[in-house]
Amino acid sequence: MKKFYLFILAWIPFFIVPVASQDIPGSDSLQVKTNTVDKLFGLADRVVEALSTDTWTFIPALTYSPETSLGLGGRALKIFRTSRGELTDTRPSSLPLTLLYTLNHQLIITGELELWMNENKSFLNSRIAFSDYPFQFSGIGNEITSAEYYATRYFYFHLYYEKMLGKGIYLGPRYEFRVDDIYDKTPGGLLEAGNIPGSNGQRLSGLGLALNIDRRDNIFQPGSGVYHQISWMKFHSFFGSNFDFSQWILDFRKYWPIKERQVLVGQARFSFTQGRAPFQHLSLIGGSDLMRGYFEGRYRDKHAMVYQLEWRFPVYQKLKMVGFGSIGQVGRSLKEFGVNPNLRFAGGVGFRYRLNDEGLHLRIDFAYGDQAAFYFGLNEVI
């Protein structure tokens, strides 16, 4: 672990460029370097502009994470406002469409609509996804087994609607549907034995409710405010599900502005599952959003808790850096939580490059948990 962090720290000076060279020994050389970097940033901006129209941005999708390996494809992104005029404060809505194929032979097709309406008095989110997804399973609980291979074709859909009750307070219903066809498993593995819920596929259909307190100053790149969400989902045969269980998710985030456009971000996230849930829908840690540095779902069980902290600061023009750390654990009961050997740690550094005036960013993260990991994608994690 120490060698990994020293490697990352050794590269940081190459990304930090002086913004002024006046009265500094060797300033001519520094000015040449600055001009070179200016040209590189200018080239990046021109590439984004060339792939954009007045309403759509087209981005060759290049992603990477331990779960997918390198992914290649395309993304079309539309950012718009439902209300026009100088006096409106309606947040920007977004419509990203993605087609991706990874070196792990995963096909991912997604579309998502985030719609802010009536000067932020109502919000709608809808997402649809289809994937042919070879993946890994490491067992349930804190005593993980050797990762075994399985492949699933799944379809997913959700629809959330929220209505403002007061300043930054939203309440509304939600619906989720997912169907999995697991068509390949590791011979002799845990999933092939058929004793784990969901090992023969699943069909989930459920209704729920969410309460949000959203007082962020920017939805893509918050610099101050809070985002707290308490959601509850119930999956039941009455709604067409072949698994009956419920799940609570509590997600609390706080953004503290500090000097010179720096931001400190904290998150506490808890997931509680009641009933017989399939392994695909248990509480978990790992992946690009929850404890970077652990494979997604490396640890999973009925309950999970994760704490994450990020420090974001500007470097040069549209380039920013991020330092982050996280701790988390899973358990079959709440009694298993605490300061014990099951508590996991992760941390790392990242780089951000702003793509547009609304605050959309490219994201590159280097993390270490139980493995060294590299992530490349869009938007902030928290």
Image: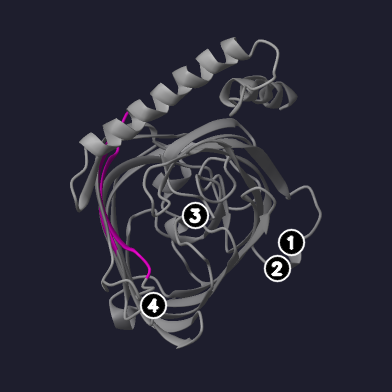
Q: Earlier in the sequence, mark 4 or mark 1?
A: 4
Q: Is residue 24 left or right of residue 101?
A: right
Q: Amino acid at mark 1?
A: Phe
Does residue 164 lie above or below 338 as drawn?
below
Q: Is residue 183 visible?
A: yes
Residue placed most toward the observer, 18 or 205:
18
Circle 1 residues within 10 Å: few <14, some 14–19, many ≥20: some
Residue at image coords 36%, 73%: 90
Q: Are marks 1 and 2 in contact (CB under 8 Å)?
A: yes
Residue at image coords 38%, 51%: 357
Q: Quadrant of the N terminus?
A: top right
**Residue picked out by circle 1:** 337
Magenta segment boundaries in residue numbering: 91-113
In this figure, which residue is indicated by the disc labeled 3?
221
The residue identified by callout 4 is: 120
What's the CA distance linking mark 3 and mark 4? 17 Å
Of the two numbered discs 1 and 3 on the same chain, state the one appearing first in sequence.
Answer: 3
* Residue 146 seen in this snapshot: no
Q: In the figure, 184 relative to 126: above or below?
A: above
Q: Circle 4 — which element? A: loop
The residue beneath circle 2 is 334
- 11 relative to 308, above or below: above
Q: Position of residue 153 (x, y in %)?
A: 26, 49
